[in-house]
Image (spheres, rainbow, N blue to C red):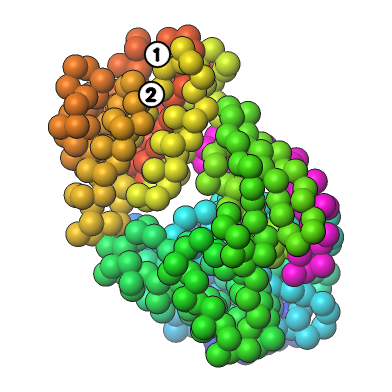
Amino acid sequence: MIRMTLAEVAAAVAGRLQATDADTPDTTVDGTVDTDSRLIGPGDIFVAKPGETTDGHRFVAAAAQAGAALAIVEHPVDAPISQIVVADAVQALADLARTVVAQVRAGGDLRVVGITGSNGKTTTKNLLARILQDEGETVAPRASFNNEVGAPLTMLRVTADTRFLVSEFGAAAGGQIARLAGLVTPDIGVVLMVGLAHAGGFGGVEETLKAKTELVEAVRPGGVAVLNADDPRVVTMAAVAAARGVAVRWFGRSTAAELRAEDVEVTASGTTCVVVAGDERLPLRLRVLGEHHVMNALAALAAARELGVALRDGIARLETVEIAERWRMQPLGSDRVRIINDAYNASPDSMSAALRTLAQIAEPGQRKVAVLGAMSELGEYAGEEHDRVGLLAVRLRIERIVVVGRDARRLYLAAVGEGSWDGEAVFFETADEAFDYLSGELRDGDRVLVKSSNSAGLRHLGDRLGESFS
Protein backbone atom coordinates (compact mmCIF):
# COMPACT_ATOMS: atom_id res chain seq x y z
CA MET A 1 0.00 0.00 0.00
CA ILE A 2 1.06 3.60 -0.41
CA ARG A 3 2.40 5.41 2.65
CA MET A 4 -0.36 7.04 4.72
CA THR A 5 -0.58 8.43 8.23
CA LEU A 6 -2.82 6.75 10.77
CA ALA A 7 -5.00 9.87 10.68
CA GLU A 8 -5.32 9.62 6.90
CA VAL A 9 -6.29 5.96 7.11
CA ALA A 10 -8.87 6.74 9.78
CA ALA A 11 -10.35 9.50 7.62
CA ALA A 12 -10.49 7.21 4.57
CA VAL A 13 -12.45 4.55 6.44
CA ALA A 14 -14.54 6.93 8.56
CA GLY A 15 -13.09 5.34 11.69
CA ARG A 16 -11.94 6.33 15.16
CA LEU A 17 -8.22 6.04 15.83
CA GLN A 18 -7.05 4.49 19.08
CA ALA A 19 -3.27 4.72 18.89
CA THR A 20 -0.81 3.06 21.21
CA ASP A 21 1.52 5.19 23.35
CA ALA A 22 4.25 4.63 20.75
CA ASP A 23 2.13 5.96 17.86
CA THR A 24 0.59 9.31 16.98
CA PRO A 25 -1.94 10.32 14.30
CA ASP A 26 1.07 11.30 12.16
CA THR A 27 2.66 7.84 12.37
CA THR A 28 2.84 6.38 8.87
CA VAL A 29 2.05 2.89 7.59
CA ASP A 30 2.65 1.38 4.16
CA GLY A 31 2.54 -2.36 4.65
CA THR A 32 0.39 -5.01 2.98
CA VAL A 33 -3.30 -5.04 3.92
CA ASP A 34 -4.83 -8.44 4.64
CA THR A 35 -7.72 -10.14 6.43
CA ASP A 36 -5.71 -13.31 7.13
CA SER A 37 -3.54 -12.96 10.23
CA ARG A 38 -1.35 -15.83 9.02
CA LEU A 39 -0.17 -13.66 6.14
CA ILE A 40 0.61 -10.60 8.26
CA GLY A 41 4.22 -9.50 8.69
CA PRO A 42 6.10 -6.53 10.13
CA GLY A 43 4.52 -3.19 9.23
CA ASP A 44 1.35 -4.72 7.73
CA ILE A 45 -2.27 -3.72 8.30
CA PHE A 46 -4.70 -6.35 9.60
CA VAL A 47 -8.42 -6.00 8.92
CA ALA A 48 -10.43 -7.92 11.53
CA LYS A 49 -13.30 -9.12 9.38
CA PRO A 50 -16.09 -11.10 11.02
CA GLY A 51 -16.63 -14.36 9.12
CA GLU A 52 -19.09 -17.21 8.84
CA THR A 53 -16.93 -19.64 10.80
CA THR A 54 -14.67 -17.38 12.85
CA ASP A 55 -14.11 -13.74 13.77
CA GLY A 56 -11.02 -11.81 12.75
CA HIS A 57 -11.05 -9.98 16.08
CA ARG A 58 -9.84 -13.19 17.70
CA PHE A 59 -6.59 -12.85 15.76
CA VAL A 60 -5.72 -9.20 16.33
CA ALA A 61 -3.24 -10.14 19.07
CA ALA A 62 -1.61 -12.70 16.76
CA ALA A 63 -1.31 -10.04 14.03
CA ALA A 64 0.29 -7.68 16.54
CA GLN A 65 2.74 -10.37 17.59
CA ALA A 66 3.62 -10.91 13.92
CA GLY A 67 4.56 -7.24 13.67
CA ALA A 68 1.42 -5.61 12.28
CA ALA A 69 1.48 -1.83 12.53
CA LEU A 70 -2.28 -1.29 12.53
CA ALA A 71 -5.55 -3.17 12.97
CA ILE A 72 -8.88 -2.07 11.52
CA VAL A 73 -11.57 -3.42 13.86
CA GLU A 74 -15.30 -3.17 14.50
CA HIS A 75 -14.73 -2.95 18.25
CA PRO A 76 -11.58 -2.32 20.32
CA VAL A 77 -9.48 -5.37 21.13
CA ASP A 78 -7.12 -5.81 24.06
CA ALA A 79 -3.91 -6.06 22.05
CA PRO A 80 -0.69 -3.98 21.85
CA ILE A 81 -1.42 -2.40 18.47
CA SER A 82 -2.91 0.83 17.16
CA GLN A 83 -6.50 0.30 16.10
CA ILE A 84 -9.03 2.13 13.95
CA VAL A 85 -12.59 1.32 14.99
CA VAL A 86 -15.12 1.25 12.14
CA ALA A 87 -18.77 0.31 11.77
CA ASP A 88 -18.13 -2.30 9.08
CA ALA A 89 -14.70 -3.80 8.39
CA VAL A 90 -15.56 -4.96 4.86
CA GLN A 91 -16.87 -1.51 3.94
CA ALA A 92 -13.74 0.02 5.47
CA LEU A 93 -11.64 -2.22 3.25
CA ALA A 94 -13.49 -0.93 0.20
CA ASP A 95 -13.25 2.71 1.31
CA LEU A 96 -9.50 2.40 1.89
CA ALA A 97 -9.04 0.79 -1.53
CA ARG A 98 -10.96 3.60 -3.22
CA THR A 99 -8.81 6.23 -1.53
CA VAL A 100 -5.50 4.52 -2.27
CA VAL A 101 -6.25 3.94 -5.97
CA ALA A 102 -7.49 7.51 -6.38
CA GLN A 103 -4.31 8.91 -4.83
CA VAL A 104 -2.05 6.77 -7.01
CA ARG A 105 -4.03 7.77 -10.07
CA ALA A 106 -3.77 11.44 -9.21
CA GLY A 107 -0.03 11.23 -8.77
CA GLY A 108 1.01 9.08 -11.72
CA ASP A 109 -0.04 7.21 -14.84
CA LEU A 110 -1.93 4.27 -13.31
CA ARG A 111 -4.30 2.54 -15.74
CA VAL A 112 -7.06 0.25 -14.46
CA VAL A 113 -8.55 -2.74 -16.28
CA GLY A 114 -11.65 -4.52 -15.01
CA ILE A 115 -12.53 -8.03 -16.19
CA THR A 116 -15.81 -9.90 -15.79
CA GLY A 117 -17.71 -12.73 -17.43
CA SER A 118 -19.43 -15.95 -16.51
CA ASN A 119 -16.29 -17.91 -17.36
CA GLY A 120 -12.65 -17.17 -18.06
CA LYS A 121 -12.05 -14.22 -15.72
CA THR A 122 -9.07 -15.67 -13.87
CA THR A 123 -7.37 -17.01 -16.98
CA THR A 124 -7.81 -13.73 -18.84
CA LYS A 125 -6.55 -11.80 -15.81
CA ASN A 126 -3.43 -13.94 -15.67
CA LEU A 127 -2.80 -13.66 -19.40
CA LEU A 128 -3.21 -9.88 -19.39
CA ALA A 129 -0.99 -9.51 -16.33
CA ARG A 130 1.70 -11.53 -18.07
CA ILE A 131 1.56 -9.20 -21.07
CA LEU A 132 1.62 -6.02 -18.98
CA GLN A 133 4.33 -6.97 -16.48
CA ASP A 134 6.98 -6.35 -19.14
CA GLU A 135 5.63 -2.81 -19.57
CA GLY A 136 5.79 -1.76 -15.93
CA GLU A 137 4.75 -2.62 -12.39
CA THR A 138 1.50 -4.58 -12.64
CA VAL A 139 -0.86 -5.54 -9.82
CA ALA A 140 -3.32 -8.37 -10.43
CA PRO A 141 -5.34 -10.62 -8.11
CA ARG A 142 -3.90 -13.70 -6.48
CA ALA A 143 -5.99 -16.75 -7.41
CA SER A 144 -9.64 -15.64 -7.79
CA PHE A 145 -9.62 -12.57 -5.57
CA ASN A 146 -12.71 -11.09 -7.19
CA ASN A 147 -15.30 -10.57 -4.45
CA GLU A 148 -16.07 -7.86 -1.89
CA VAL A 149 -12.96 -8.77 0.09
CA GLY A 150 -10.55 -10.09 -2.55
CA ALA A 151 -10.98 -7.24 -5.03
CA PRO A 152 -10.19 -4.43 -2.52
CA LEU A 153 -7.24 -6.42 -1.15
CA THR A 154 -5.83 -6.52 -4.68
CA MET A 155 -6.42 -2.81 -5.18
CA LEU A 156 -4.58 -2.07 -1.95
CA ARG A 157 -1.41 -3.66 -3.31
CA VAL A 158 -0.83 -0.71 -5.66
CA THR A 159 2.09 1.57 -4.96
CA ALA A 160 3.17 4.94 -6.31
CA ASP A 161 5.10 3.07 -9.01
CA THR A 162 2.25 0.85 -10.19
CA ARG A 163 1.41 1.37 -13.86
CA PHE A 164 -1.34 -1.21 -14.31
CA LEU A 165 -4.04 -2.54 -11.98
CA VAL A 166 -5.91 -5.54 -13.34
CA SER A 167 -9.07 -6.21 -11.33
CA GLU A 168 -11.24 -9.31 -11.66
CA PHE A 169 -14.89 -8.79 -10.77
CA GLY A 170 -17.10 -11.71 -9.83
CA ALA A 171 -20.62 -11.59 -8.48
CA ALA A 172 -23.37 -13.85 -7.24
CA ALA A 173 -26.08 -11.17 -7.34
CA GLY A 174 -26.89 -7.89 -9.02
CA GLY A 175 -25.16 -4.74 -7.81
CA GLN A 176 -21.94 -6.41 -6.68
CA ILE A 177 -19.93 -5.62 -9.80
CA ALA A 178 -21.18 -2.04 -9.75
CA ARG A 179 -19.94 -1.63 -6.18
CA LEU A 180 -16.54 -3.19 -6.84
CA ALA A 181 -15.89 -1.50 -10.18
CA GLY A 182 -17.13 1.76 -8.70
CA LEU A 183 -14.17 1.74 -6.34
CA VAL A 184 -11.72 2.26 -9.23
CA THR A 185 -13.74 3.46 -12.29
CA PRO A 186 -11.84 1.32 -14.84
CA ASP A 187 -10.21 2.80 -17.91
CA ILE A 188 -10.93 -0.47 -19.70
CA GLY A 189 -13.71 -2.96 -19.03
CA VAL A 190 -13.46 -6.46 -20.49
CA VAL A 191 -16.58 -8.63 -20.73
CA LEU A 192 -15.88 -12.22 -21.74
CA MET A 193 -19.27 -13.91 -21.89
CA VAL A 194 -22.68 -14.18 -20.25
CA GLY A 195 -23.66 -17.73 -19.33
CA LEU A 196 -25.33 -19.73 -16.60
CA ALA A 197 -22.54 -19.56 -14.01
CA HIS A 198 -24.12 -18.40 -10.70
CA ALA A 199 -27.49 -18.16 -12.47
CA GLY A 200 -29.19 -19.47 -9.36
CA GLY A 201 -28.03 -16.46 -7.37
CA PHE A 202 -28.90 -13.97 -10.08
CA GLY A 203 -32.31 -15.46 -10.80
CA GLY A 204 -31.70 -16.27 -14.46
CA VAL A 205 -29.45 -15.51 -17.39
CA GLU A 206 -31.12 -12.17 -18.17
CA GLU A 207 -30.35 -11.00 -14.65
CA THR A 208 -26.80 -12.25 -15.15
CA LEU A 209 -26.61 -10.06 -18.26
CA LYS A 210 -27.69 -7.01 -16.24
CA ALA A 211 -25.06 -7.76 -13.62
CA LYS A 212 -22.21 -8.15 -16.11
CA THR A 213 -23.32 -4.95 -17.88
CA GLU A 214 -22.55 -3.12 -14.63
CA LEU A 215 -18.86 -3.21 -15.55
CA VAL A 216 -19.47 -1.36 -18.82
CA GLU A 217 -21.55 1.17 -16.90
CA ALA A 218 -18.63 1.71 -14.52
CA VAL A 219 -15.99 2.43 -17.19
CA ARG A 220 -14.97 6.08 -17.17
CA PRO A 221 -16.31 8.23 -20.02
CA GLY A 222 -13.66 8.23 -22.71
CA GLY A 223 -12.57 4.74 -21.69
CA VAL A 224 -12.89 1.49 -23.63
CA ALA A 225 -15.14 -1.57 -23.40
CA VAL A 226 -13.53 -4.73 -24.78
CA LEU A 227 -16.44 -6.97 -25.75
CA ASN A 228 -16.97 -10.50 -27.08
CA ALA A 229 -18.36 -10.16 -30.60
CA ASP A 230 -19.47 -13.82 -30.59
CA ASP A 231 -21.81 -13.57 -27.59
CA PRO A 232 -25.17 -12.00 -28.52
CA ARG A 233 -25.80 -10.94 -24.93
CA VAL A 234 -22.44 -9.20 -24.64
CA VAL A 235 -23.07 -7.47 -27.98
CA THR A 236 -26.03 -5.65 -26.43
CA MET A 237 -23.61 -3.88 -24.09
CA ALA A 238 -22.29 -1.78 -26.98
CA ALA A 239 -25.33 0.48 -26.72
CA VAL A 240 -24.66 1.02 -23.02
CA ALA A 241 -21.05 1.90 -23.81
CA ALA A 242 -22.04 4.36 -26.52
CA ALA A 243 -24.48 6.12 -24.20
CA ARG A 244 -21.65 6.67 -21.71
CA GLY A 245 -19.10 7.90 -24.25
CA VAL A 246 -17.15 4.66 -23.97
CA ALA A 247 -15.49 3.26 -27.09
CA VAL A 248 -15.96 -0.41 -28.00
CA ARG A 249 -13.34 -2.87 -29.22
CA TRP A 250 -14.48 -6.29 -30.38
CA PHE A 251 -12.70 -9.63 -30.02
CA GLY A 252 -13.84 -13.08 -31.09
CA ARG A 253 -13.71 -15.65 -33.85
CA SER A 254 -16.33 -14.13 -36.13
CA THR A 255 -15.60 -11.62 -38.87
CA ALA A 256 -17.38 -8.97 -36.78
CA ALA A 257 -14.42 -8.91 -34.39
CA GLU A 258 -11.65 -6.35 -34.89
CA LEU A 259 -9.24 -8.78 -33.21
CA ARG A 260 -10.05 -12.35 -34.13
CA ALA A 261 -8.66 -15.88 -34.29
CA GLU A 262 -8.61 -18.06 -37.38
CA ASP A 263 -7.37 -21.58 -38.12
CA VAL A 264 -7.71 -22.78 -34.52
CA GLU A 265 -6.19 -26.21 -33.84
CA VAL A 266 -6.17 -28.04 -30.50
CA THR A 267 -3.58 -30.60 -29.43
CA ALA A 268 -2.45 -32.18 -26.18
CA SER A 269 0.38 -29.64 -25.96
CA GLY A 270 -1.78 -26.54 -26.42
CA THR A 271 -3.70 -24.57 -29.02
CA THR A 272 -2.54 -22.79 -32.15
CA CYS A 273 -4.29 -20.16 -34.20
CA VAL A 274 -3.70 -17.12 -36.37
CA VAL A 275 -4.50 -13.78 -34.72
CA VAL A 276 -5.91 -11.26 -37.20
CA ALA A 277 -6.07 -7.51 -36.61
CA GLY A 278 -6.54 -5.44 -39.76
CA ASP A 279 -3.62 -6.25 -42.07
CA GLU A 280 -1.72 -8.11 -39.34
CA ARG A 281 -1.84 -11.91 -39.32
CA LEU A 282 0.32 -13.41 -36.59
CA PRO A 283 0.59 -17.01 -35.36
CA LEU A 284 -0.13 -17.75 -31.69
CA ARG A 285 1.02 -20.97 -30.01
CA LEU A 286 -0.80 -21.04 -26.69
CA ARG A 287 0.48 -23.66 -24.27
CA VAL A 288 -2.60 -23.40 -22.07
CA LEU A 289 -4.85 -26.38 -22.83
CA GLY A 290 -8.27 -25.86 -24.35
CA GLU A 291 -9.78 -24.23 -27.42
CA HIS A 292 -11.90 -21.98 -25.17
CA HIS A 293 -8.76 -20.24 -23.91
CA VAL A 294 -8.26 -18.72 -27.37
CA MET A 295 -11.06 -16.29 -26.53
CA ASN A 296 -9.41 -15.42 -23.22
CA ALA A 297 -6.14 -14.78 -25.04
CA LEU A 298 -7.88 -12.55 -27.58
CA ALA A 299 -9.51 -10.54 -24.79
CA ALA A 300 -6.14 -10.06 -23.08
CA LEU A 301 -4.48 -9.03 -26.34
CA ALA A 302 -7.29 -6.58 -27.15
CA ALA A 303 -7.03 -4.91 -23.73
CA ALA A 304 -3.23 -4.79 -23.95
CA ARG A 305 -3.40 -3.09 -27.36
CA GLU A 306 -5.55 -0.34 -25.83
CA LEU A 307 -2.76 0.14 -23.30
CA GLY A 308 -0.15 0.59 -26.02
CA VAL A 309 1.27 -2.94 -26.29
CA ALA A 310 2.07 -4.05 -29.83
CA LEU A 311 0.19 -7.16 -30.91
CA ARG A 312 3.41 -8.99 -31.76
CA ASP A 313 4.82 -8.30 -28.30
CA GLY A 314 1.62 -9.40 -26.60
CA ILE A 315 1.60 -12.69 -28.50
CA ALA A 316 5.24 -13.39 -27.68
CA ARG A 317 4.53 -12.94 -23.97
CA LEU A 318 1.41 -15.14 -24.05
CA GLU A 319 3.46 -17.94 -25.56
CA THR A 320 5.53 -18.11 -22.37
CA VAL A 321 2.48 -18.98 -20.22
CA GLU A 322 2.35 -22.70 -19.41
CA ILE A 323 -0.81 -22.96 -17.29
CA ALA A 324 -3.61 -20.50 -16.63
CA GLU A 325 -3.69 -21.18 -12.88
CA ARG A 326 -3.48 -24.15 -10.56
CA TRP A 327 -6.54 -26.42 -10.96
CA ARG A 328 -7.48 -24.78 -14.27
CA MET A 329 -6.77 -27.14 -17.16
CA GLN A 330 -3.59 -28.04 -15.28
CA PRO A 331 -1.69 -30.95 -16.86
CA LEU A 332 -0.55 -33.53 -14.29
CA GLY A 333 0.57 -37.15 -14.36
CA SER A 334 2.81 -38.18 -17.25
CA ASP A 335 2.71 -38.98 -20.93
CA ARG A 336 1.66 -42.47 -19.85
CA VAL A 337 -1.50 -41.30 -18.06
CA ARG A 338 -2.23 -37.60 -18.49
CA ILE A 339 -4.45 -35.96 -15.86
CA ILE A 340 -6.06 -32.59 -16.64
CA ASN A 341 -7.13 -31.04 -13.35
CA ASP A 342 -9.78 -28.40 -14.06
CA ALA A 343 -11.76 -28.72 -10.85
CA TYR A 344 -11.50 -25.22 -9.37
CA ASN A 345 -14.75 -24.04 -10.90
CA ALA A 346 -17.46 -25.29 -13.21
CA SER A 347 -20.48 -24.02 -15.09
CA PRO A 348 -22.41 -25.52 -18.02
CA ASP A 349 -20.25 -23.55 -20.47
CA SER A 350 -16.90 -24.41 -18.91
CA MET A 351 -17.89 -28.04 -18.37
CA SER A 352 -18.80 -28.38 -22.05
CA ALA A 353 -15.58 -26.67 -23.13
CA ALA A 354 -13.46 -28.95 -20.95
CA LEU A 355 -15.18 -32.10 -22.24
CA ARG A 356 -14.69 -30.98 -25.83
CA THR A 357 -11.02 -30.34 -25.10
CA LEU A 358 -10.69 -33.88 -23.73
CA ALA A 359 -12.26 -35.22 -26.91
CA GLN A 360 -9.96 -33.12 -29.09
CA ILE A 361 -6.64 -33.95 -27.45
CA ALA A 362 -7.04 -37.72 -27.24
CA GLU A 363 -5.30 -39.45 -30.12
CA PRO A 364 -6.45 -42.72 -31.69
CA GLY A 365 -5.97 -45.54 -29.22
CA GLN A 366 -6.00 -43.22 -26.20
CA ARG A 367 -8.98 -43.69 -23.91
CA LYS A 368 -10.91 -40.62 -22.74
CA VAL A 369 -11.92 -40.60 -19.06
CA ALA A 370 -14.05 -37.83 -17.52
CA VAL A 371 -14.20 -37.54 -13.74
CA LEU A 372 -17.07 -35.16 -13.09
CA GLY A 373 -18.61 -33.53 -10.03
CA ALA A 374 -21.42 -31.10 -9.40
CA MET A 375 -21.79 -27.61 -10.84
CA SER A 376 -22.88 -25.30 -8.03
CA GLU A 377 -25.04 -22.16 -7.86
CA LEU A 378 -27.30 -23.06 -10.78
CA GLY A 379 -30.53 -22.87 -8.81
CA GLU A 380 -33.56 -24.06 -10.77
CA TYR A 381 -31.34 -24.79 -13.79
CA ALA A 382 -29.24 -27.39 -11.94
CA GLY A 383 -31.18 -30.47 -12.97
CA GLU A 384 -31.42 -29.87 -16.68
CA GLU A 385 -27.86 -28.54 -16.94
CA HIS A 386 -26.42 -31.64 -15.26
CA ASP A 387 -28.54 -33.66 -17.70
CA ARG A 388 -27.00 -31.78 -20.62
CA VAL A 389 -23.47 -32.46 -19.43
CA GLY A 390 -24.19 -36.17 -19.05
CA LEU A 391 -25.64 -36.32 -22.57
CA LEU A 392 -22.70 -34.38 -24.02
CA ALA A 393 -20.15 -36.70 -22.41
CA VAL A 394 -21.81 -39.69 -24.06
CA ARG A 395 -22.16 -37.99 -27.43
CA LEU A 396 -18.47 -37.05 -27.36
CA ARG A 397 -17.75 -40.77 -26.96
CA ILE A 398 -16.04 -40.45 -23.60
CA GLU A 399 -15.15 -44.06 -22.82
CA ARG A 400 -15.34 -43.75 -19.02
CA ILE A 401 -17.59 -41.27 -17.20
CA VAL A 402 -16.86 -41.26 -13.46
CA VAL A 403 -19.40 -39.17 -11.54
CA VAL A 404 -18.59 -38.21 -7.96
CA GLY A 405 -20.89 -36.82 -5.28
CA ARG A 406 -24.61 -36.96 -4.57
CA ASP A 407 -25.21 -33.49 -6.05
CA ALA A 408 -23.92 -34.77 -9.41
CA ARG A 409 -25.93 -38.00 -9.47
CA ARG A 410 -28.34 -36.65 -12.07
CA LEU A 411 -25.41 -36.23 -14.46
CA TYR A 412 -24.68 -39.94 -14.03
CA LEU A 413 -28.32 -40.90 -14.59
CA ALA A 414 -28.43 -38.81 -17.77
CA ALA A 415 -25.33 -40.56 -19.11
CA VAL A 416 -26.83 -43.97 -18.35
CA GLY A 417 -30.10 -42.94 -19.97
CA GLU A 418 -28.24 -41.89 -23.10
CA GLY A 419 -26.64 -45.31 -23.44
CA SER A 420 -23.75 -45.63 -20.98
CA TRP A 421 -25.23 -48.59 -19.15
CA ASP A 422 -22.51 -51.17 -19.82
CA GLY A 423 -19.95 -49.89 -17.33
CA GLU A 424 -18.97 -46.76 -19.25
CA ALA A 425 -20.57 -44.57 -16.56
CA VAL A 426 -20.04 -45.21 -12.86
CA PHE A 427 -21.08 -43.31 -9.75
CA PHE A 428 -19.37 -42.84 -6.39
CA GLU A 429 -20.51 -40.98 -3.31
CA THR A 430 -17.02 -39.84 -2.32
CA ALA A 431 -13.75 -38.80 -3.90
CA ASP A 432 -11.93 -41.52 -1.94
CA GLU A 433 -14.12 -44.19 -3.54
CA ALA A 434 -13.50 -42.69 -6.97
CA PHE A 435 -9.74 -42.62 -6.33
CA ASP A 436 -9.70 -46.29 -5.38
CA TYR A 437 -11.63 -47.16 -8.54
CA LEU A 438 -9.48 -45.02 -10.83
CA SER A 439 -6.23 -46.32 -9.32
CA GLY A 440 -7.10 -49.76 -10.65
CA GLU A 441 -8.98 -48.69 -13.77
CA LEU A 442 -6.63 -46.21 -15.47
CA ARG A 443 -4.13 -47.63 -17.95
CA ASP A 444 -1.39 -46.50 -20.28
CA GLY A 445 -2.58 -44.00 -22.85
CA ASP A 446 -5.55 -42.69 -20.87
CA ARG A 447 -6.35 -39.00 -20.99
CA VAL A 448 -8.28 -38.01 -17.87
CA LEU A 449 -10.27 -34.83 -17.20
CA VAL A 450 -11.20 -33.95 -13.59
CA LYS A 451 -13.88 -31.26 -13.59
CA SER A 452 -16.27 -29.86 -10.99
CA SER A 453 -17.12 -26.76 -9.05
CA ASN A 454 -14.80 -25.85 -6.21
CA SER A 455 -17.35 -26.92 -3.60
CA ALA A 456 -17.27 -30.51 -4.86
CA GLY A 457 -13.61 -30.80 -3.84
CA LEU A 458 -12.47 -32.82 -6.84
CA ARG A 459 -9.42 -30.62 -7.35
CA HIS A 460 -7.75 -32.62 -4.57
CA LEU A 461 -8.74 -35.85 -6.28
CA GLY A 462 -7.06 -34.52 -9.42
CA ASP A 463 -3.89 -33.79 -7.46
CA ARG A 464 -3.88 -37.31 -5.98
CA LEU A 465 -4.30 -38.88 -9.40
CA GLY A 466 -1.54 -36.68 -10.80
CA GLU A 467 0.85 -37.84 -8.09
CA SER A 468 -0.12 -41.50 -8.56
CA PHE A 469 0.56 -41.50 -12.28
CA SER A 470 3.51 -39.12 -12.46
User: Above or below — where is 19 with respect to 32?
Assistant: below
Report if residue 319 lies within the magenta region.
yes
Q: Name the image quarter holding residue 374.
A: top left
Mark 1 neighbour class, 10 Å CA radius: few under 14, some 14 to 19, many 20 or more: some
Mark 2 neighbour class, 10 Å CA radius: few under 14, some 14 to 19, many 20 or more: many
Q: Residue at x 81, y 73 (%)?
A: 160
Q: Which residue is mark 1?
A: 442
Q: Residue at x 34, y 12 (%)?
A: 441
Q: Describe residue 200's horizontal placement relative to residue 46 as left or right.
A: left
Helix, strand or loop for disc 1: loop
Q: Nearer the viewer, residue 448 or 421?
A: 421
Picture disc at residue 369: 2
Residue 13: x and y in percent read 57, 84
> Answer yes or no: do the residues labelled 2 and 1 have beta carbons within 8 Å?
yes
Type of amino acid at the residue the image marks with label 2: Val
Report if residue 322 lies within the magenta region.
yes
Q: Residue at x 35, y 49 (%)?
A: 348
Q: Quadrant of the C terminus?
A: top right
Distance of label 2 from label 1 (alpha carbons):
9 Å
Q: Which residues are magenta?
A: 305-330
